[in-house]
Image (spheres, helix red, strand yellow):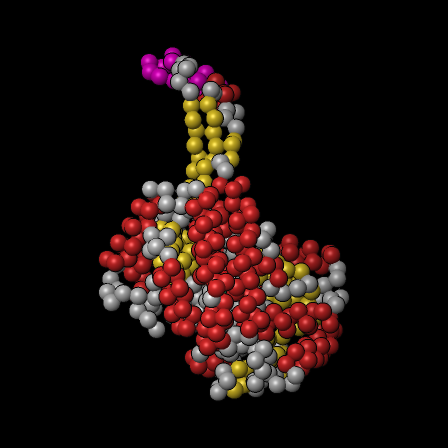
Amino acid sequence: MIEATADQSTKPYNALMNAQRSFIQKGGLRTLKQRKEVILKLKKLLKDNEDRIIEALQKDMGKPETEAYSAELLFIYNDINHQLKHLKDWMRKTNVSTSLINQPGKSYLKPEPYGSVLIIAPWNYPLQLLIAPAIGALAGGNSVVLKPSEITSHLEELIHRLINNNFQREVIHVVCGDKNATQSLIDAKPDYIFFTGSTKVGSLIMQQAAKYLIPVTLELGGKSPCIVHKDANLAVAARRIAWGKCMNAGQTCIAPDYILVHEDIAKDFIEAFNNVIHQNYQGDVLNNSDMAQIVNTHHFKRLTAMISGDVVSGGNSSETSRKIEPTLIMNPDKDHPAMQEEIFGPILPIITYRQIDEAIEKVNSGDKPLALYVFTSSSSTKDKVIEETSSGGVCVNDTIMHITSNDLPFGGVGSSGIGSYHGKQSFDTFSHMKPVMEKSTWIDPSIRYPPYKLSWRRFEKLFLWLAG
Ligand code: NAD
């Protein structure tokens, strides 16, 4: 791991953020042209270094090349293209009506940047979750301080070098380090904090930000349930659930965390799931380069310690390759370790239910999840689940894919997060929508000024009529 500065106190970070703030105040990213230039330069830097990025992701966690390209780079390119296509429209002020009481005058909302934005990223998609929020922040005309995860150290080192060697520090700057670096960065009082990571650390970040009243977006985790109803297309459900759970070896914030399956089809679902795994990994998950590694030994041990009870599929692991077979655990009781915390690995508890209400009750008995999946061919079952549960987002008859939409904001609710981004929502998140009223001076009725001529009752009537 590299240290960003020898001195991890707040002082150098104060200087950095002041320089960024002053750059923004002086109009450094005020125009569409300036913002587009920076975003395109960032895209070119990534394009020119794709091989190195993929290599770093493979060194850090054996990310399969296809996953490294699609879930990290391609995801970012798609976001950049969308932002650039619409930025001109989003940057426009939005006119709103002006009531009679303020005539002659006009009113509008003008998006303005916050200033210096701090982006704190986790290790599971260490590039995407660092750069995608940065694109939104730059589109909104902000400067950015990036704090990558120290756990994926190859990617951390590479992105530090690429960005800091190619951009003015007033525009984007990478700071490396552990939690002490992050805490010092927050103490330097950025104008906005965008955090992606665990619920526990998210709460600490928010407490520290509250000291300085810094606004936050928190993209957190949790246990995302997946309901498989008896009328689901089982072959497709098994394939899509296995894909969503095995991508990045289950180290995905919106991976299905546990399955709620109708008891009539539980056996068939397990069989279909096993067939998919066999087909996808040719019977050898532990030596297969299409399965990512668990990020480190600490997480490998945490996960393998969860494998107990009625294991109906998988269960084997290799500490040498840091790989774990997709493992189904049947009806674990509520004290089972896999039901205590977000799993974040290829282990999948399966809980059977008889009535859809039982599945809904189970979902509602836990914290509000980041994602909820339901596989069914019945629109009334689908509507009931959507209506009677609360989650950051829902995807019907698929897993993960809702995150790829430019038109669906992504974020949690309750303990799975505060705020959202992607598409226009990224621009809105990183913009203060400043309300502006411009008034003319050519009439100035004396009625509002002392000495007051109307009784408050008559004043009220007049005010409500004019303001309505
Ligand atoms: P983490 O919370 O441990 O770390 C995230 C970042 O916070 C890292 O950069 C780390 O250096 C920093 N950090 C850690 N402890 C800190 C502290 N005490 N004070 C200040 N900073 C601190 O998360 P992680 O292990 O890197 O990532 C896994 C978690 O992230 C999972 O819970 C997952 O669900 C969640 N996640 C959420 C999303 C989302 O979009 N909602 C995406 C990916 C991951």
> Could you tell me which residue is drawn at 23 percent across and 65 percent down?
7
Q: Is residue 221 magenta?
A: no
Residue 324's spot in the image, x, y percent? 55, 82
| In the rendered image, the vertical position of residue 49 relative to residue 411, given as above or below | below
Stretch in magenta = 446-461
In the displayed structure, would residue 48 be above or below residue 450?
below
Q: Is residue 354 left or right of 212 when viewed as pictured?
A: right
Q: Residue at x 50, y 51 (%)?
A: 426
Quadrant assignment for ligand 1: bottom left
Screen quadrant of the N terminus: bottom left
> Would residue 108 be visible to someone looking at this image?
yes
Query: Is residue 358 visible to the viewer in this orientation of the structure?
Result: no
Farthest residue, direction top: 453
x, y percent for residue 318: 52, 87
Q: Residue at x 52, y 42 (%)?
A: 88
Q: Position of residue 301 (x, y in %)?
A: 46, 82
List x then y, in percent, for residue 245: 59, 72
Indicate whether 416 appears above or below 441: below
Between residues 162 and 219, which one lies in front from this camera angle? 162
